[in-house]
Image: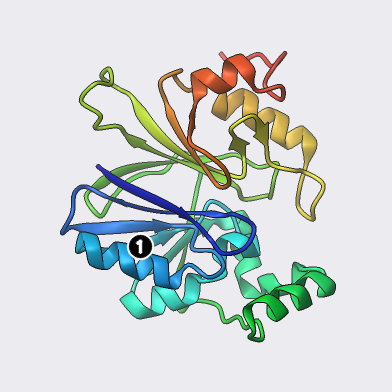
Amino acid sequence: MLVHGFPAQAFGTNCYVLAPAPGEECLVVDPGIGVLDSLAEVLREQRLRPAAVLLTHGHLDHVYSLTPVCGAHGVAAYIHAEDAYRLRDPLASIDPALLAMLESEFGARAQWSEPDDVRTLSDGLTTSVAGLELSVDHAPGHTEGSVLFRLPSDDPHADAGAQVCLSGDVLFAGSIGRTDLAGGDAVAMQDSLRTKVLPLRDDTVVLPGHGPTTTIGRERASNPFLRGLVPAS
């Protein structure tokens, strides 16, 4: 499996491109602010054709370039049903001073329009998209509709059943997503970590929404936010 990640120009949000191999259809995950040129370069170099855009949640820094990407390639956006409302106007949830700062930095007025084709995801969904087997875990806490996306690993050195997990803002290397924003819920986050994150195998490779790649085993051993939590049986 080809996995290419790169940071957006604001907030360090990771955008990922996943495909079975070069020259195939691909998935674009969390196209944030200022990613269009970098994304186009990856698609061109690897000869990839987007089949869908996946969203780990609906915050602006993860969805800002969603509509241009969907429109340019004629593909749908996929988001959990409980975060779908955020795509109506994610700019509305941004502090006006922060929005002004971003507009000044990028030299353009922020604009938003909802994609024409938005499809909702549900917990436990397993499907095949762009030749990749994809599982969806609803993991609220950072937002109401945050999800984890899991795919089988094709690392020849990994054991059978190893997976890759796109964790969005649920889990980071050494940290977790904040719960003090609108729609956040600290209790729900604890439950998501206990029931969705901790049961994953130690060799699961984690591709987070911000920061470096990690593994479940590394986070289980060192992430202070996971200490003391007992995984669901």
Q: Residue at x 53, y 51 (%)?
A: 56
Helix, strand or loop for disc 1: strand
**Depicted 221 relative to depicted 127: above or below:** above
**Depicted 219 relative to depicted 142: above or below:** above
Query: Residue 149 location, x and y as percent?
Result: 45, 42
Count of residue discs: 1
Visible in this render: residue 199? Answer: no
Quadrant of the rendered image containing residue 76? bottom left
Quadrant of the rendered image containing residue 222? top right
Q: Residue at x 65, y 23 (%)?
A: 223
Task: Tell me if 158 is positioned left or right of 221 in this view.
Answer: left
Quadrant of the rendered image containing residue 29? bottom left
Q: Residue at x 50, y 23 (%)?
A: 216
Residue type marked 1: Ala
**Depicted 141 relative to depicted 50: above or below:** above
User: Which is more toward the observer, 90 or 15?
Assistant: 15
User: Which is more toward the observer, 52 or 125?
Assistant: 52
Query: Residue 70 location, x and y as percent?
Result: 40, 73
Q: Which residue is mark 1?
A: 52
Number of other residues with Cα within 10 Å of mark 1, as a class: few under 14, some 14 to 19, many 20 or more: many
**Rendering colour mode:** rainbow
Visible in this render: residue 155? Answer: yes
Query: Residue 22 location, x and y as percent?
Result: 18, 54
Q: Quadrant of the C terminus?
A: top right
Q: Quadrant of the N terminus?
A: top left
Q: Residue at x 42, y 43 (%)?
A: 125
Query: Residue 20 location, x and y as percent?
Result: 21, 47
